[in-house]
Amino acid sequence: MNIDSITNGVVIDHITAGAGMRLYELLGLGELDCSVAIIKNVQSAKMGKKDIIKIDALIPIDFDVIGYVDPGATVNIIRDEKLVEKRTIDMPELLTGVIKCKNPRCITSVEQELDHVFRLTDRAGKVYRCIYCETKAG
Ligand code: ZN
């Protein structure tokens, strides 16, 4: 994979330096068959340092995951070597099935089939809480 050019794929850019690995894990990129590159600590005029993730296939991206981990990231969709879509991400109000509630007494620990759902309760502080027991995510 030539990391400078992608024919068809997704480039997640402007990731806060250090957040690339977390995004990689929560997006499940390790399970893909295609090439995936994480480039860490890239010099950026705007950000100082940033991480970039390049995925060499047009896979569906869960924008909620990106909005939760790093809402400042941008997602570029590349088709036939052309940038066809550039998307900025917002923090999702609800985050479903991405992270798990850590409270052992939470209903989601007992009822295994329940979705783990978190609600954004403090936008400035980036705080998400379990909708069932109010436990803070993180
Ligand atoms: Zn809970």
Image (cartoon, helix red, strand yellow):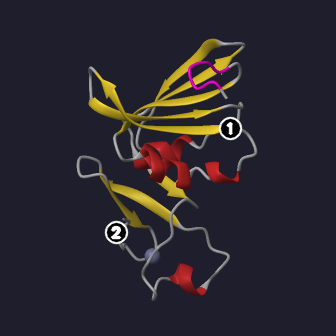
**Quadrant location of residue 122?**
bottom left
Residue at (58, 18) in percent of width and height: 85
Dot 2: what SS? loop
For the residue pair 52 and 120, the one nearer the viewer reads as 52
**Residue at 49% across / 48% down in the picture?**
23
Q: Position of residue 79 (x, y in %)?
A: 70, 17
Which residue matches tag 1? 35
Identify residue for label 2.
136
Give the camera-side residue of 30 and 2.
Answer: 2
Residue 85 vertical position relative to residue 17 in the rendered view, above or below? above
Front residue (pair 100, 52): 52
Q: How crowded is mark 2: few (under 14 residues within 10 Å), some or many (20 or more)?
A: some
The mark nearer the N terminus, 2 or 1, is: 1
| Main secondary structure along the magenta-highlighted residues | loop
Range covered by the magenta-colored residues: 2-6
Snapshot quadrant of residue 89: top left
Q: Where is residue 87 in the image (x, y as percent from the top left)?
A: 50, 25
As drawn, is 64 to the left or to the right of 73?
right
Q: At label 2, which amino acid type do we have?
A: Lys
